[in-house]
Image (cartoon, grey):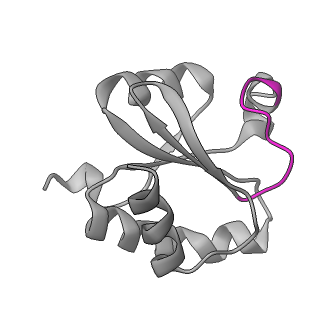
Amino acid sequence: MSEQHQRPMRVAGGEELDDVLADHDRVLVEFYTKGCTLCQSIEPVLGNVARETGVPVAMVNPGEDIDLVDEWNVRSVPTLVLVEDGVEVARLADGFQGGQAIEDFIAEHT
């Protein structure tokens, strides 16, 4: 497994997110905001999830590219969106989630 799949990738805006989605068949996208303690708490969990599942994780702050809020219908953070072949297949926007819950979420939708 490559190093890039082992830790979450921080992406800067929609264009970079589009590139990541184009490069991978399946990606777990986390929408977060700076200063969000739940978002900070979930980051190491997402690294473990990426290692366990082999699904790359992309982290993006929609505050840095406000168009992402509407484009991805982000209403709370952290929001996790599972994307396959560039299309959203599932969403988890229930606050902090543990690693097992996120792994189960991925397994359920793949």
Report the side of 46 relative to 90 (left or right).
left
Please name the residue shown 58% across and 45% down the image: 90
Q: Which residues are magenta?
A: 70-78
Report the side of 98 relative to 46 (left or right).
right
Please name the residue shown 69% across and 66% down the image: 39
**Residue 7 lies in what quarter of the image?**
bottom left
Identify whether 76 is placed above or below 41.
above
Quadrant of the image containing the N terminus: bottom left
Residue 4: image location, x then y, percent: 27, 50
Residue 19: image location, x then y, percent: 42, 22
Please name the residue shown 43% across and 56% down the image: 8
Report the side of 85 relative to 73 (left or right).
left
Which is the main secondary structure of the residues drawn in magenta? loop
Identify whether 44 is placed above or below 59.
below
Disc tally is: 0
Q: Nearer the viewer, residue 110 or 100?
A: 110
